[in-house]
Amino acid sequence: MPLRDYLLTNENIKFQSHCRVRYGERLYRIVVTDLRIILFAQRGTFLKSDDVVTEPLDKLNGVEYFEKGFIFRNAKLSIQGTTKLDLFGPTADLKVLFNTLQSVLAT
């Protein structure tokens, strides 16, 4: 199933990552809508299955951003909601995601 099948009616996408980030031991694409954060991946070669993790934006308590590395810079984004999401990936995508979540949390 494509990602649009998991969107709710009247749910609009505000941010979509260009590359995949690591959550746990798996890689996901990140989508932020006006209602929630969605981690989405398709698994399998022949028999495709979807792997979806969601967190409602109204349940978010805080967001933390860390960068490390000198030549190869990587970032960690910790999102505290009903569960803690620790996302690891390239600084370019995670910094934009951090700024987007901060603007959403400020309103």
Image: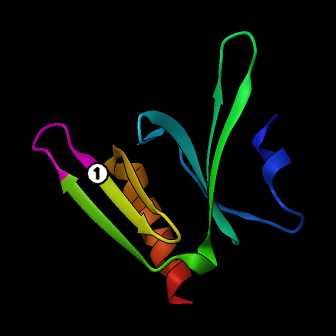
Q: Answer with left or right where residue 14 lies relative to residue 20.
A: right
Position in image of residue 2 (x %, y %): 79, 37
Q: Secondary structure at mark 1?
A: strand
The quarter of the image holding the C terminus is: bottom right
For image coordinates 50% across by 88% down, the residue present is 106
Nearer to the camera, 84 or 76: 84
Can residue 24 be seen at all in this image of the molecule?
Answer: yes
Q: Residue furthest left?
A: 70
Q: Residue furthest right?
A: 9
Q: Main secondary structure of the magenta part?
A: loop
For image coordinates 30% across by 64% down, the residue present is 65
Please, is residue 48 above or below residue 91 in the view?
A: above
Boundaries of the magenta span: 68-75
The quarter of the image holding the N terminus is: top right
Please, is residue 76 above or below residue 72 in the view?
A: below
Q: Quadrant of residue 86?
A: bottom left
Q: Answer with left or right where residue 70 lies relative to residue 20.
A: left
Q: Residue furthest front?
A: 82
Residue highlighted by disc 1: 75
Can residue 33 be seen at all in this image of the molecule?
Answer: no
Query: Does the segment drawn in magenta span residue 17?
Result: no
Q: Answer with left or right where residue 72 lies relative to residue 64.
A: left
The color scheme shown is rainbow
For image coordinates 19% across by 37% down, the residue present is 72
Query: Does the segment drawn in magenta span residue 71?
Result: yes
